Amino acid sequence: MRLSKRSAALIATGLSGAMLLSACGGGDDDGGSSGGAAADGGTFSIYINEPENPLVPGNTTETEGGQVVDTLWTGLVEYDPETNQAAYTGVAESIESADQQTWTVTLKDGWTFHDGTPVNAQSFIQAWNYTANSANAQGNSYFFANIAGYDDLQAAETGGQPAATEMSGLRQLDDLTFEVQLAEPYAQWPTTTGYSAFFPLPQAFFDDPEGFGEQPIGNGPFQAEEPFVPGVGITLSRFDEYGGDQPANAESVEIRVYTEQSTAYTDLQGGTLDIVDTLPPDAIATAEQEFGDRYIETEQGDITSLGFPTYDQRFADPNVRKAFSMAIDRQAISDAIFNGTRTPAASYISPVVNGHRADACDTCQLDVEEANRLLDEAGFDRSQPVDLWFNAGGGHEEWMQAVGNQIRENLGVEYALRGDLQFAEYLPLQDAQGMTGPFRSGWIMDYPVAENFLGPLYSTEALPPAGSNVTFYSNPEFDRLLAEANAADGDEAAIAGYQAAEDVLLADFPAAPLFYRLNQGAHSERVDNVIINAFGRIDAAAVEVVE
């Protein structure tokens, strides 16, 4: 199917390649897959799993809640679905800097929240200070760690109060302009601001955070006129006062919660659900033939890894972790279960961003002899089974069982599948160091920079409960190299720095890279212009309901 196209003009911020921002405007492609005429509005339905947390941008760190939040909000910049480059189709008129450290953000005039209040500089400053403040326990707090004064918002101990409630690096210049002072230069910073952590918040949030999380008020193309119902979902209606370039085509979108991916797929086949963004593994081989032009394949900016609980003594030795990795035949699993649509991973960095190296990981290849040597050298007790963890309802059991069978065959270690927890239960258990063995870890990029595959998952700043470092890995050398790469002057130096940090990660090996995904989705005959981007998100505003 066709994706929307936009013309691009580069701005002078010293960025290049995938890190460039482009000023965008103009036009969607005509046509689509079904050939029907677009109806005036209409409603359609999409599938998600249960979100982990209430729907607040600063505390939404996973895909399911992320789909809802991205439908309700628009950030400073957006990401072009064809190029993955950041573009000025959001709230920002410009983000400019002379030294890559002090950034001036100028907002477009006329944007409002769904309650009619204006989106202004204070909407961003208040939201960012709240999210960064450790007392508020927001999962996206660490995305502000490079702003001056962030450390003052971090309490010395869990549950304590920080020294300040406002970052010194944020300063309002006027109603539509604010300044961001970073602790160190970071040339890629404008690109990061399209992620949900950086979304604005209205005063209504600060008046009632709990109620807001049930019925959020954003500034995006759809609005919530009713609360989100756990286990059921929410219907969002078109926001007619939307300030962006692409207002919603449909009158409303019904976002339905399913506990089983297979059930959603059955409903899609039966015509009672309109869009499934990810197909069950056992459907991939036949879906293209079944759905024809309504079948969608998208290269994802993601990685699937086998995470290791580095806090568990059995997996504290990097050689144990490397042994398990070298016992896994990634290509065989891709061929047998995913019909060849998963690419074996040999880097922590996705191929869709600059900095990926196809051969970075020499312990990501099947090598049974070396795996057994490393396991023996580490003194690993093979008589005790290992638990293999994954979330229920996401289509992971078959491939995780294949991983277990290879571990048993190649290492002589029995396994037990632990796939009984729903997504909203699985993630908090990871945060609480509840994994008793290797676990399925999935990551879709927040923004198209190599750092996003490193920092949020493995830096000390990103440890739970305020981050996504669920292996609980920490190495000061890795943190130092990552910070130096962020502060590099120019793309080439930054990428070299990220790769140096990745080399430290590969030596310590807190997780085994497994697959990059070519995502498969499909839609019903009722809808057209369905875009599933490299972030795994359905562009709800673009969807057309057809006659």
Image (cartoon, grey):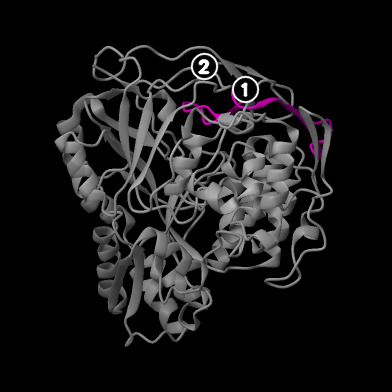
Residue at 50 percent across and 41 percent down: it is: 69
Q: Is residue 252 left or right of residue 206?
A: left
Q: Earlier in the sequence, mark 2 or mark 1?
A: 2
- Between residue 231 and residue 269, name the one nearer to us: 231
Asked whether residue 140 is drawn in magenta, I would say: no
Is mark 2 in CB contact (under 8 Å) with mark 1?
yes
Asked whether residue 105 is drawn in magenta, I would say: yes
Residue 33 coordinates in the image, percent (x, y): 27, 20
* Residue 91 location, quadrant: top right
* Residue 103, visible in the rendered structure: no
Q: Badge 2: how crowded within 10 Å, few (<14), some, or many (20+)?
A: some
* 444 versus 306 height, above or below: above
* 362 versus 531 height, above or below: below
Give the residue type that dot 1 points to.
Answer: Ser
Residue 11 coordinates in the image, percent (x, y): 70, 21
Residue at 65 percent across and 59 percent down: it is: 136
Dot 2: what SS? loop
Residue 4 coordinates in the image, percent (x, y): 44, 19
What's drawn in magenta, residue-wise? 79-106
Quadrant holding the N terminus: top left
Residue at 35 percent across and 19 percent down: it is: 41
Residue 293 coordinates in the image, percent (x, y): 23, 24
Residue identifier under label 2: 6
Give the residue type that dot 2 points to.
Answer: Arg
Q: Which mark is residue 22?
A: 1
* 47 versus 271 height, above or below: below
Residue at 32 percent across and 27 percent down: it is: 43
